[in-house]
Amino acid sequence: MNNMETVVQNVWTKTKVLVKALIIGLIVLILQIPTFYVTDLIKEREQRQREAITEVSSKWAGRQNIVGPVLVLPYYEANADSTKSRHFAYFLPDQLNIVSKVSPEEKYRGIYKVMLYTSGVHLDGSFNGISLEKLKIASENAIWNEAFVHLGVSDVKGLNDDIRLSWNNQVLDMSVDGSGAQALDEGLNAPLNLTGSDDLKNVRFSADLNINGSEELLFTPVGKTTSVEMTAKWPHPSFTGDILPSQKNISDDSFQAKWKSVSLKRNFPQQWKDNSFVVRQTIYRGTDMTSTTAATAGVNISTSAFGADLYVPVSGYQKTLRSVKYSFLCILLTFAAFFLIETSNKKSVHPFQYGLVGLALVLFYTLLLSFSEYIGFNFSYAIAAAATIGLIAWFIKGILSSSRLTVVLSVVLLLIYTYVFTILQLQDYALLLGSVGLFITLAVIMHFSKRIQW
């Protein structure tokens, strides 16, 4: 009878360990439910930040893209029924030089930072003449006295002064009057009152803009040769757009960048008719391009724009969201270490207590999110990790009644959080570090699991 009881007891002991391991695995899966809610919370706070940026930008000015100047010439074209229809021809400058000095301003909407700027933009260049023959337009069909020059601005609300364009020996006042040209989007126009093609030979032009914007400033290279120089008192530029700067100098408090573009690198010509190509105010948002007005036809020349984004380096929401992706790994490794410690030392911990430890691990991310909105991600991570480790250590010491085992588990948690933090910082080597770390972790678990008697 005693032997039978011993056998039953041994079987139950082994079964109990297996059943407990399965229950712990189930708890790990159940804890992913609150983790999903934390992920939604992070996305909601990030969306609120975008709304705050949009609200402030709508009152100041949005992202800016300067396009032009573009010479627009109306003309008549004969139809099959002997009537005439009105069309537009577009001509781009041969040379375009742009110098921009940007003065960033940090504004806050509640707790959210919004990056605004004021920029003085000087542009000059030349038209060496136009060729109507290439577009198969007869000179007598051109409506010379209705020709005008267009300067595209993404958000005209950001203009601080009137724009006067120097065009050879005359000064043109530019306005937002509608032109009727379907290929043009929001911007400024000025009539030229030409008498013929001779008026467009060796034209020199220049203009100065004092413009507000938010986050990003771009320029579309409409010149056959376009050179752009940008300077700003901001140490964290993110160069964006179709091409990168040929020269750049970034210091602790400012940057200077230069671009050079030639027409051979673009996807649009120096001249076209009607909607073969369109001038839409396309802006970049990260790696995506968004047009403020959907082009109905043709190729949008503004997709060739380039410039700089006044990047805010602390992206707390994105880093917090990335850290949540490692929550399953953190919970699993913590529970595995906890299980090995209690099993190896013949201690007994209730599954409910595992669940409480798991909830503490999930609350780490809410602490991280809430603190990062005020003091940045790195300090928030340290505070949230210290608070979580301290809470779990206090709880485990009361359960296991062993300072040594509590220290062991605390060190394991410290290593896990340090490991995840290192992965978050080293984005380029995240996969390599993650693979090596998991391999070493598996080796350690395999080593200590040999002590378990099944």
Image (cartoon, rainbow, N blue to C red):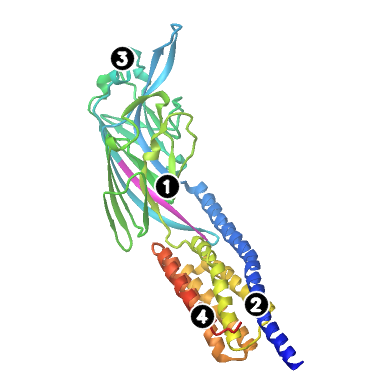
SS at mark 3 in the image? helix
**Mark 4: amino acid:** Val
Q: Position of residue 403 (x, y in %)?
A: 56, 91
Question: To which residue does mark 1 refer?
Answer: 212
**Mark 3: amino acid:** Ser
Q: Is 306 left, or right, of 383 in this rendering?
A: left
Question: To which residue does mark 3 refer?
Answer: 139
Quarter of the image where one finds residue 435: bottom left
SS at mark 2 in the image? helix
Crowdedness near tag 3: few (<14), some (14–19) or many (≥20) residues, C-alpha within 10 Å: some
The span from disc 2 to disc 4 (Cα, nearest Å) is 23 Å
Considering only vertical position in the picture, is 301 above or below 390?
above
The span from disc 4 to disc 1 (Cα, nearest Å) is 52 Å
Question: To which residue does mark 2 refer?
Answer: 18
> Which mark's residue is nearer the viewer, 2 or 1?
2
Question: To which residue does mark 4 refer?
Answer: 412
Q: Would residue 332 be counted in the magenta stretch?
A: no
Please say whether residue 426 is visible from this viewpoint: no
Tell me the magenta residue range: 112-122
- The residue depicted at 34 percent of the width and 18 percent of the height is 144
